[in-house]
Image (spheres, rainbow, N blue to C red):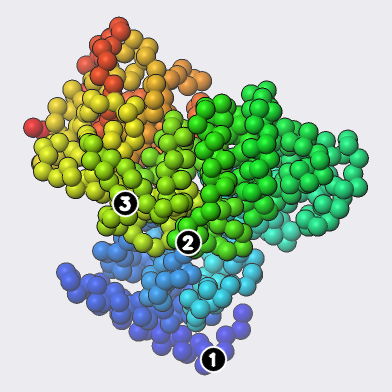
Amino acid sequence: MTIHTESAEQLNVLLERLDLQGAQLQAASGGDKSDHALRVLDVAGCVLQHEDGLPALRQRAAMLDDAGLFLGTDWGSPADLLPNLVKHTLTYAAPATITLEAMSLLRFLAVAKGEHSSTSLSADEAKAFLTQVLAMNLDRLLGQAPDEAQRMAQGPMMGAVNRLLRYLMQEIGTEGILDRLIDEIWRIMAQRPLQVDHVKAMVVQIALAMQDGGAHSSDVHRGADRLISALFGPTTLCRDDPGLTVYLDRLARADERAVQDEAYALARAMHDTGLVSDYHAMFLRWTLEADQSRMLPDALGLSSTGLDALRCYEPLVRAMISSAIQPGTAQAVYGLSLMLERGILYSPPIAPSLWRLLETPLSPDCIAALEGSCGPALPAQTHLIAGVLLLLGQPLGIGQGNNPTCQSARALSMWALNDPDYLLWLIAQVSRGDHLLMHFEGEPLDTATLPPGLAGTGPLDADPVSVLLVPHLDRAYAEMGRRCAGRPEDPHCWINPELHGWWVGRAFHIAVDVATGALKDYEGFLRIFHASYHPLHNGNQPVIHPQPAGIAVTDVTGAFVGWHAITLIRVGLDPEGCMRVYFFNPNNDSGQDWGQGIVVSTQGCGERFGEGSLPFGEFAARLYLFHDDNLPALAPVPVPDDQIALIADMGRKSWASGRADL
């Protein structure tokens, strides 16, 4: 590439300034480091925007890292960084933060190429990180124009970021980008989340990349074709993605055999991937309008259980399809199918509660909340009913989004799984009166009179049911905590049974002393957990009701991050004969690395959709709080001392590190 003399001279001047500032950063100590780091970033940002500045920044990445550029920032520990956060930073952050992110990526490149060493990051790990970053920025790599929000947010940095990503791809290569992205989509969809808009957006990027020749591997094509076809061409009549109007015209002219094949193909694609095409939603609506409702069972992919439920409650099912299932809410088709398969309509309160929901006009505040979250293109009630279908069909698919509301998300999941009529009663209260009337130890709690909780007052990044209920549940939960203030035990001892329901075990066990944070008879705590939940030590008693529990979350190094609410679903042998705890994590993605080799599995170890699982001992090593029913064990078997010692050692060397024993 020919470099103009004036441009080259300008770059040389900037690099001289950068080297000077870097040397001063290296020599600085204490609080002066941050001031010098800001000066480095100011010059590095100018170099970054120079069209030929990236190789020079790459050459200096190791030196600036060693000098302390990232010291005291979120980028200080490269092994803990998350590739899925990079895109947002590069798009919306301030110029100095974008520059810092860019320097971090060039640091990863230097490690990946063997030009820089890091005690916490190997070359393979650095390359894997960059590959994931590139996979999540395929739209930029494919030359797609940014939307107005991105353009306004970035301003002059937009071109620099695009050059950076292209430079990284040139150095790392395209191999592995698409297949990693496809693998990630399949991993996410194996958990069957309620919210899949981000997944659908990634599938669109894959389709564009393949169309432009960005995928060369036949394995990539096979993995991607199933995802792309599930959304844009799941059947013969829509394989060419003709648009909804043309598709309806083709259906109207098709013979009965062709329509039957459409129903089978739509159901197969939906259950295979967990993704639902807008064509599927239109097909269901067409079956009702064209008097083809006999096709419903096949289009929903129902077994004999779901078919019986459909036949018993067909008027209700038809009404829900008519009200809730549109091209913009197609994912609710999957929720409807799974709800019928669960057989919960046979519970006497459920059908009348759903009829009430269909006929209830929403309050203005509810409409505003749903439109703020879901948009105004479809009626708010359509989004709400679609959200109810999804939650009742996939109780373990709900997530807390980017909100500190794991308690509320867990509660919604538990009610949808174990007490759906109560969930529908809560929805009725909020949709009609914009409040919840709950009780704590016999005293009423009216959420309309309570201050906001952690959810705040802004729009929630969550499903429609959560959008309506979580702000109220969050207030009730916070008030229950206030009423427990001053009690000698962890407040969840009283909150969990009152918030969730009668079936929460009244016996409460916690591994830490609330007042001091010290460990409290940790080995005894682990023995009680085994006696309560391990089938080989509790007389083979199963988990009857889902139970709230608390885990000490740790990062990939095993260091303590914080406390987190989960649901203990069941305990049993996996296909390999390992005793595992199967649990629900409301943190949107259960597949996490908690250090010490403890990696949560979401598929392949006997998990049902939405469950995470760990071997019993590994789960116990991160557990700090649980309930049980306090019933005597039928045939208790003592737990070997060495087994308890091993688990306790894992806990003490991770989340409990530094905690004294009482």
Cβ atoms under marks 1 and 2 closer than 8 Å: no
Quarter of the image for residue 260 reads: top right
Indicate the position of residue 451 as horizontal and vertical percent values: 27, 57
Query: How many neighbours does mark 2 have within 10 angstroms: few (below 14), some (14-19), or many (20 or more)?
Result: few
* Residue located at (58% from left, 72% from top): 147
Instruction: Tell me the amino acid under the disc marked 3.
Output: Thr
Quarter holding the C terminus is top left
- Expressed as whole percent of the image width and height from the top left, the position of residue 637 reads 28, 9
| Side of 327 relative to 74 (left or right) | right
Residue beneath disc 3: 447
**Is 448 left or right of 325, judged from the image as shown?**
left
Q: Nearer the viewer, mark 1 or mark 2?
A: 2
| Residue occupying the far left of the picture | 662
Residue 619 rendering spot, x and y as whole percentages: 34, 30
Say whether residue 528 is left or right of residue 312: left
| The disc label shown at residue 364, or none | 2
- Disc 3: CA contacts within 10 A as few (<14), some (14-19) or many (>=20): many
Marks 1/3 in contact by CB < 8 Å: the verdict is no
Q: Marks 1/2: CA distance?
A: 64 Å
Q: Residues within 10 Å of mark 1 (few under 14, many from 20)?
A: few
Please report the residue visible at 31 percent of the width from the left and 69 percent of the height from the top: 69
Mark with earlier residue (1, 3) = 1
Asked if 170 appears above or below 614 in the picture, the reply is below
User: Is residue 393 positioned above or below 404 on the image?
Assistant: above
